[in-house]
Amino acid sequence: MAEAYDLLQELLEAGSPPGFVETCRDLRDSMLFYDREVLIGAYTGALEGLAFNVLLDAAIGQPETFPTATERVRDFIRALPDNLDLREFPMDVQSLAERFLETGGRSLYEAFPAWVAALHVYQSGEYSDDDDIDRLLAEARYQAELGNESQALARIGRVGALALTGRRVRPVWGRIAGPLEPWLHGLYTAVEAVANHERLTYPLRPIGEERLRRSARGVVRDLSLRRRYDEPASDVWRDHDDVDRFYSEVISGRDRLSEAAYAVVQAQGVTLLPVLLTMVGARELRDDEQSREHLAPVRALDALVALHAAEAVPMLLRIVAEVDPQDELFTAAQTGLVKLGSAAAPQVLSFASGEADAETAIYLSEVLSRMDKNERVFRFLTSLFRKTSWWEGKGALVRALADYGDTRALPLLRDALRNLDQRDSRQSELLREAIGSLSRRAERPKMSPRGRRMRRQ
């Protein structure tokens, strides 16, 4: 890896004790006001730029050395805690190095897998302009939450290749990345390293074209202090359009979405699904009760319902099964399922009668009772009523049967009333109200089609 050797040597020098002290001193001297965290961020950025460019130069200029370059950079990152053990230096220098290892050193370690994954995909060309970055990131987050790191990284690699070649990653992902956050930061630093490259032009062209252009260029040198820290050199994460503004409105946790937001929903359609579904399921948003962002999942759910997206049903079922019933998101999920109606009914019934626990099944019975009439739903409600005790939630099923409105449930309710201990006044009241409601339905005269038309007139 002769061509990348100079960059690697610069990286090793910058990560040595003398290099750390000298680089931090140079960065400090260029600062108008000293701020330790800004200084550490600048030093971290310098190492990130150098480390990624070692890998990139090998991938483009000498692909056969890429595995070796990967090992050398990995070894460098892993050795940082030992290399920067500065106990023989003054206390302020020791403190600075320790703080870097806690923050920037960890950032390098966590970003490295994303760099390698992105460059593997970029080299192989296994990405396409038709790839949906939002869908890839949503899938990557899902796989990461399941603990499938290799599957998540495979998708991050494709996102990275797309970002290096100029595709945008929407800013909203900076708030909903969840377990992907370190890798997403790694992709950001990779794009910045290319954008600040002295001999490369961002965005990168396909690997074959870059290799042809490479033969006429020399190796990049002296990148360590060249990075810009005030503004990113690329705008891959910065551009804003109507969709970005829509996501910002959802994240803000307003009491309700604006008309402009619903206009975006109607215009964009199902392309919004990956981000909206991720928002709804993002635990870090709903757990942040100190800000209004905890309402963002509810607003995202409102948008999903407006889309009439059956793809949202599994997520809504998961919320009903997992979220506290006192949470606004729980109520919104129940209401959303009802509004989706026939698009949701088969999945709701299948889940309620299958894998759902007893408590969740009862909550879903409330949803099913407000949907269109269906013989399978009626059988489910009556079966659940028979096998549920009062302490388990039979009262909710009494109300569900009354709301469903099928008078065939009357014998079942009357039998329950006869067998009830009359001292249970609340239970007795619930049954009598349900029986009264269904009885009135049964007594209501049925009108002929002609009579119904005259009544409407």
Image (spheres, helix red, strand yellow):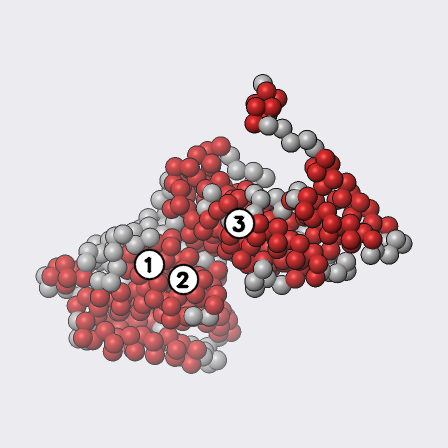
Quick one: label 3, few (<14), some, or many (20+) residues within 10 Å? many
Q: Is residue 120 above or below residue 261?
A: below
The Cα atoms of the two marked residues, 3 and 2, are separated by 29 Å
Q: Label 3, secondary structure: give it.
A: helix
Q: Which mark is residue 345?
A: 3
Quick one: label 2, few (<14), some, or many (20+) residues within 10 Å? many
Q: Is residue 403 left or right of residue 304?
A: right
Amino acid marked by disc 2: Ala
Of the pair 155 and 338, the residue shown nearer to us: 338
Q: Is residue 100 left or right of residue 197?
A: right
Q: Which mark is residue 159?
A: 1
Q: Residue at x 38, y 68 (%)?
A: 151
Q: Residue at x 75, y 60 (%)?
A: 389
Q: Is the C terminus in the top left, top right, bottom left or bottom right quadrant? A: top right
The Cα atoms of the two marked residues, 2 and 1, are separated by 10 Å
Closer to us: mark 3 or mark 2? 3
Quick one: label 1, few (<14), some, or many (20+) residues within 10 Å? many
Q: Is residue 450 above or below residue 358?
A: above
Amino acid marked by disc 1: Val
Q: Is residue 320 left or right of residue 120?
A: right
x%, y% of residue 364? 61, 53
State which tag comes first along the sequence, 3 or 1.
1
Of the pair 56 and 339, the residue shown nearer to us: 339
The Cα atoms of the two marked residues, 3 and 1, are separated by 35 Å
Amino acid marked by disc 3: Ala
x%, y% of residue 200? 20, 57
Q: Is residue 234 left or right of residue 293?
A: left
Q: Residue at x 49, y 32 (%)?
A: 259
The residue at which mark 2 appears reads as 140
Asked if the residues shown at circle 3 and circle 1 are in contact, with their CB atoms under 8 angstroms apart, the answer is: no
